[in-house]
Amino acid sequence: MCPIITHEDELELASTEKELVNHISKLAKAQNTLINAQKKYAEALTKVNLEREMLNRTYRDVLKQMQTLVREKRSNIKDEEVNLFQDIVHKNDEFIEGNNKYIDAIKNLTVKKEYFIQKKNELANALNDVAGKRGALIKKALNVEKAKNKLIEGEKLKILDSELNDYQRDFDRARDVLIKKIHQFIEVRDEVNELWIQLKNSVFKSS
């Protein structure tokens, strides 16, 4: 046997929707703080990579001089030294390229996450609007029901029914907006998830 759905159930839903709005907003705020930290991390990595580039230029200068001197038997340069420096320069080039890809992936993710938070806030606003209109619609319906029970005049009843229809149309519009915002939220959420995978794949060994 199916339970009887009452107006109180729908009013409770509106109240719970308001609570959900509050939690969505709090999460969005916390995620925004995290995004700012990720931006600072990307900035710090960029500075490190620039320093590594400067370092590697000097390594190259040293290597070129060593490669010139090693041709002279009387120089104090051994082939092993040259090979070791070549390996360091080569590895640094790999680190720089890998870190640049990693930094770009972080930046792409933070930009998309900012957009995701915007969509999350839009969803929360739409849900808040629906909750408010749901509550207003139910209370209006209860008032109309009470009026009908009092057997009020037919003309007044028509006015009340017309007002209730306006409330219903207002609610329906708000719900349509919410559904649209949910679709947008899911679409951007999936894009963020894909960028997390790209970030994971961009991780490169470095030192």
Image (spheres, rainbow, N blue to C red):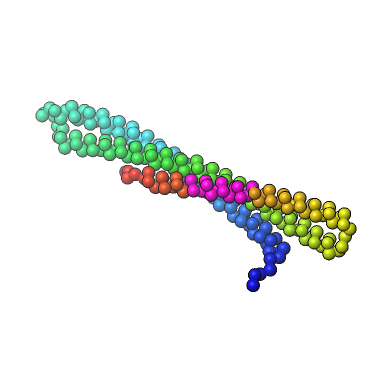
Quadrant location, the N terminus: bottom right
x, y percent for residue 60 = 26, 31
Rendered residue at 23%/31% (across/down): 63
Left or right: 86, with 188 as reference point: left
Left or right: 189, with 69 as reference point: right
Q: Residue furthest bottom?
A: 1
Quadrant location, the C terminus: top left
Left or right: 179, with 141 as reference point: left
Rendered residue at 19%/30% (across/down): 66
Q: Is residue 181 magenta?
A: yes
x, y percent for residue 133 = 71, 53
Residue numbers of the magenta segment: 177-192
Q: Is residue 48 above or below residue 132?
A: above
Left or right: 104, with 169 as reference point: left
Rendered residue at 77%/61% (across/down): 142
Count of labels in the image:
0
